[in-house]
Amino acid sequence: MNQSPAPDAPLAGLRVIEFSLLGPGAVGTHLADMGADVIKVEPPAGDYIRQMTWPIIEGSSLLHWHIHRGKRSITLDLRTDEAQEIFRDLARGADVVIEAMRPGALARRGLGYEDLLSVNPAIVFCTISGYGMTGPYADLPSHGIAYDTWAGLVNVAYNDEGFPYLPEHPSVGIHAGPLFAAFGVLAGVVKARATGVGSFLEVAQSDASAAMDWLRSETWKAYERPESEVTGNASDNYERRAPGTAGMEEGVRYQVYESSDGHVLLMASEQEFWRNFCEGVGRMDMFERWPGNRYGDHARGNTEMRRELVEIFRTRTTAEWVEWAGTVNTTIAPVNTPRTLADDPQFRDRLGFMPHESHGADMIPHPVKFVDAELPDPGPAPTAGQHTDEVLAEVLGYDADRIAALRASGALGATGDAS
């Protein structure tokens, strides 16, 4: 195995065959982190994810170290009949097959869902791709940022020379797509174990981007209806405010402020939290003057109040404000960056990094915690074909002579162990 044993892990005993390229392989990562045995089937040269993006850590990309942690790798040249038969053997004893590339890649090799039903009627088959199996964009090649620009998640910026560019932003589709897919896979497994009937599901990472940002898109759709049916919030005199944080640019009770050493986010839009804040800083005069509404009142455009808060927040460090907020029951959060997050005490307590000494790269662990079960400690991502002989012998029961014959035939590639 490519991870520490955890016999009581939630997905212990679940076997997944993953045929993936690049980021969509994260479907299997979520399952492996929960204890599933994920066997990654690679071409003899290996998944070129190892050379994609940056940083490159000891010869392989961080993308590879993270996405393929805890998995086993077997190399098969699926252009050969022998390798296709091995894949069918793997699917015969598996719960799940993941096709994480353009839809139909396995079907073209005679290994699609309908083909595999003949060897395993309960197989759960998941295909995940950029734009999914249908629609005018289905066959377009793409990369991860495309799904976020498509879904309206990225605001185009312009540099001093007037050229548009992509500003720094969190990627959504390439992470949310595999997460939705893993959720769907487990739903399929529940059905298969109850009925003996398999499932075929497909996920588009672009769809996932749109689904994760549903509030903004659905708000604009709601505003297409007449104002007699759809209004804004009572705290803004029912004005239809633009959705998302752009609509809070003039907010005051819900806003970012400078602390003495960084920034904090004040979120006292509920009257109770605003009262507690004012009482805690000894400024009940501010509450009496600007009590606000009970819910959702950002005191938008109140520049005088904003100036008062600017001076107040400069009197303490970010850490002091966060600790203080807990004592007075008001809503203040630290404003971290991807670089400073690691120093946050909540991050260190809840997540931390799995160390590169044992995992190949410093990585954030899976965020789901089972209070009454131990999750496996995922081992480092494998080299291409690192577990070929092990899987063929342990999982399929092939003897040494058969493995040697397969290697000689080219079904496993030239060496079965590319880097």
Image (spheres, rainbow, N blue to C red):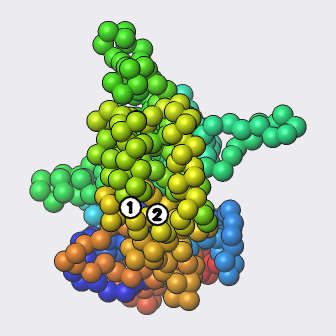
Amino acid, disc 1: Ala
The residue that appears at 68% across and 36% down in the rendered structure is 156
CB under 8 Å between discs 1 and 2: yes
Q: Which residue is mark 1?
A: 325
Residue closer to the observer: 216 or 397: 216
Q: Which residue is mark 2?
A: 321
Residue closer to the observer: 349 or 410: 349
Q: In the visual, does 327 lie left or right of 103? A: left
Residue 263 position by quadrant: bottom right
Amino acid, disc 2: Trp
Q: In the visual, does 333 lie left or right of 279? A: right
Is residue 43 shown to the viewer in this render?
no
Secondary structure found at label 1: helix
Residue closer to the observer: 280 or 54: 280
How crowded pointer 1 is (Cα within 10 Å; few <14, some 14-19, many 20+) is rated as some
How crowded pointer 2 is (Cα within 10 Å; few <14, some 14-19, many 20+) is rated as many
